[in-house]
Amino acid sequence: MNQQLSIAVFASGRGSNFQALHQALIAANSAATIALCISNNPNPGAFDFARQQGIATARLSPKMFAEEKEYEAALIELLASHGVELIVLAGYMRRLPHGVVQRWRGKILNIHPALLPDFGGQGMYGLNVHQAVIAAGRTESGATVHLVDEEYDTGAIIAQERVPVLPDDTPETLAARVLEAEHRLLPRVVMEMVAGKR
Ligand code: GRF
């Protein structure tokens, strides 16, 4: 990838992974920049951070269009008009339209709060994931960055970071430990891709 790389981040909620990525790119004085933050929700926490940082925001949801194809065309136009070369899903709760996956195939990353392929797929988000890991009696969990394809959490795994599951963990304490791993893993993988190492 070329160094002057334009990234779009998709976030549905608070956006802590978006923040971690932005701060890591700034700290590394990376030529890659987050050109815009897109959400399916009208006013996610991620937009507050984006506005503080002068990053463009756009709310785009299938609900805003009569047809899925119109939504897909609008999303492609938005991404293309910002010259986006890398898409990062950071707490994004929607599937991307097939046309977007096809056009940016191999350049769409997602961060998942478990060690895929276990504990992934539809419904595996938020505390549900950590609840399932604890219920399964696992002694470790972690974060996964994977390529995005047409399904949920099924694309090629790029990197993982493992964390212990402690005997007295609750879903909340495990989520917090995994989130710290996410905030390390996602920026590392993005910067390796930008540097052409991946
Ligand atoms: C993270 O745990 C991420 O792995 C999952 O959703 C959560 C989003 O958190 N996809 P945030 O919005 O990045 O704080």
Image (cartoon, rainbow, N blue to C red):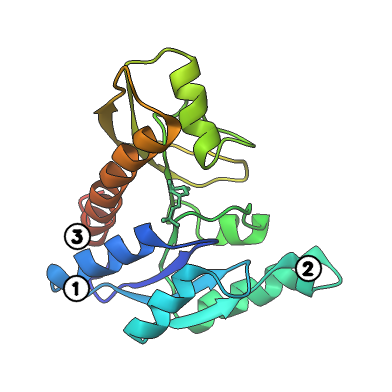
Q: Amino acid at mark 3?
A: Ala
Q: Amino acid at mark 2?
A: Lys
- C-alpha span from label 2 to label 3: 37 Å
The residue lying furthest to the bottom in this view is: 54
Labels 2 and 3: the sequence-earlier one: 2
**Residue 1 found in image quarter:** bottom left
Under circle 2, the secondary element is helix
Give coordinates of residue 99: x percent, y percent. Answer: 65, 60
Does the beta carbon of the residue at mark 1 sit less than 8 Å from ligand 1?
A: no
The residue lying furthest to the left in this view is: 28
Q: Please name the residue shown 30% across and 51% down the image.
A: 186
Residue at label 2?
A: 63
Q: Please name the residue shown 33% across and 38% down the image.
A: 178
Q: Nearer the observer, disc 1 or disc 3?
A: 1
Classed neighbour count for the residue bearing mark 1: other residues with Cα under 10 Å, few (<14), some (14–19), many (≥20):
few
Give the label on residue 26, or none.
Answer: 1
- C-alpha span from label 1 to label 3: 15 Å
Q: Amino acid at mark 1?
A: Ile
Q: Is residue 12 above or below residue 147?
A: below
Classed neighbour count for the residue bearing mark 3: other residues with Cα under 10 Å, few (<14), some (14–19), many (≥20):
some
Q: Please name the residue shown 39% across and 29% down the image.
A: 115
The residue lying furthest to the top in this view is: 137
Labels 2 and 1: the sequence-earlier one: 1
Labels 1 and 3: the sequence-earlier one: 1
Classed neighbour count for the residue bearing mark 2: other residues with Cα under 10 Å, few (<14), some (14–19), many (≥20):
few
Residue 118 visible in the current orientation: no
Closer to the camera, 114 or 145?
114
Residue at label 3?
A: 195
